[in-house]
Amino acid sequence: MKNMISTHLIQDRDVEKIVGKLLRFGVITASLIVLLGGILFLVQNGAQGRPDYHIFKGEESDFITFKGIFMGLFTFKPMAIIQFGVLLLIITPIMRIIFSLFAFILEKDKLYVIITLIVLAIIMISTFGGLKV
Amino acid sequence: MSILTFTLILILGAYLAGLVGSLTGLGGGVVVIPLLTLVFHVDIRYAIGAALLASIANSSGAASAYIKEGITNIRLGMFLEIATTIGAVIGALIAVYTPTNTIAILFGAVLLFSAAMTLRKKNQEALTEGSNLSAVLKLNSSYPTQTGTVDYKLKNIGAGFSIMTVAGVMSGLLGIGSGALKVLAMDTAMKIPFKVSTTTSNFMIGVTAAASAVVYLQRGYMDPGIAFPVVLGVLGGAFTGAKLLTKINPATLRIIFCIAITFVALEMIYNGYHHKF
């Protein structure tokens, strides 16, 4: 990474390769965390009866806010670990956009810096806009 | 049924969904919704949350492979993501006010359309005369084929952008990638060769889904007990599918699956119409 930036002019293809690696790394990490949480969840609750998934609990569910997920994570709750993996999975494509933004800045492609910022702004507004953080 | 049994059966089901989604090109998320609702009698809102996650996992996993080959048009993807993310946010907002039965009917309709799109004739031609806007936005590009690098140009950018917004709304409303609508915008309107349009569409699905995912997470659509087997199963199935695609020609398989999916879509519409969701 350092090398590429120090060569000053990075090529489109290099950027694409890093984007590819970033996506794969994100998905693999997220899946491993989901798997870890899932195994712990089964060990602790596997023998219980299946919850009533035909009844939608909605906002009364646990671990649906950032705060709730992190609190559960520090007390090692299996469901919170799964949700943390889920969060990582959601963040992966967003990280890809942030990376593309830097790549377009380095390429001095103003038009695409603006386009990327617009996409990022829409996602951020949707994520943080008036919702429980 | 114990949680353990439920989880194991669901992993197997999600694996098959990922496999079928990958072989047909529909994506695992689309197959997960009928699986969860019709087979496991899970509330459609949990199914939508799980499908959204499956779409992100699928897209990020597959995109990394295609990008390596240099087929994906990253600038085009980024530009069209303005349309799909705006659409996705609108879709997630409308979802609150839409009855679940209406969502089921709409989902069935999109599924029918997607199955039909999978079987259509694909655009192989590369356009040599593009529009001005395409040049200004630097969307014209090239991609590698077996006979060497092919240059292509784009037209009807406005029409493509509009269809992409609709694709985004569907994605936000139903939790699916709406790959079929994305390909319609790129193939039919913008005249992009289908290899580029399918890979670029796949690349965009993750970002589109991420735009509405946190909203759904905070509304309680993503239950860890469902998300965990679905994400792992679909990823595994998609991985096997990608390996199989390099060995077999799925033309016949694709037709069989699309007929099967047509029946599933009709059942979703029927059940939605009779208020079973």
Image (cartoon, coloured by chain):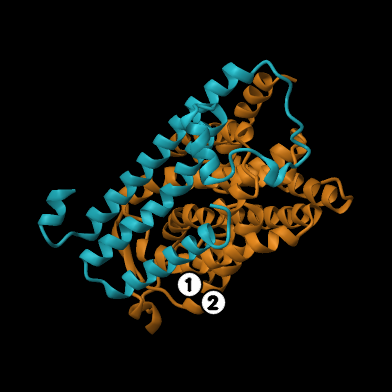
| Residues beneath discs 1 and 2 located on the same chain | yes
Query: Where's residue B55, x and y in %?
Result: 54, 47
Return the residue found at the far left. A7
What residue lies at 75% left-to-right and 20% top-to-bottom? B1
Question: Which chain can be seen in orange?
Answer: B
Which chain's residue wears label 1? B
User: Would residue B124 be seen by someone viewing this image from the given angle?
Assistant: yes
What residue lies at 24% left-to-right and 60% top-to-bottom? A12
Do residues under tags 1 and 2 come within 8 Å of each other at their CB atoms? yes
Which chain's residue wears label 2? B
What residue lies at 74% left-to-right and 58% top-to-bottom? B106
In the rendered structure, the colour chosen for chain A is: cyan
Dot 1 or dot 2, earlier in sequence: 2
Residue indicated by mark 1: B190
Query: Where's residue B18, x and y in %?
Result: 56, 37
Query: Is A37 situated above or below B199?
Result: above
Q: Residues within 10 Å of mark 1 (few under 14, many from 20)?
A: many
Query: Where's residue B48, x and y in %?
Result: 66, 47
Q: Quadrant of residue B77?
A: bottom left
Kindly state the secondary structure of the residue where label 2 is placed: helix
Residue indicated by mark 2: B159
Residue B138 in the figure: left or right of residue B82:
left
**Measured Cα–Cα span from mark 1 to mark 2:** 8 Å
Kindly state the secondary structure of the residue where label 1 is placed: loop
Label 2 amino acid?
Ala
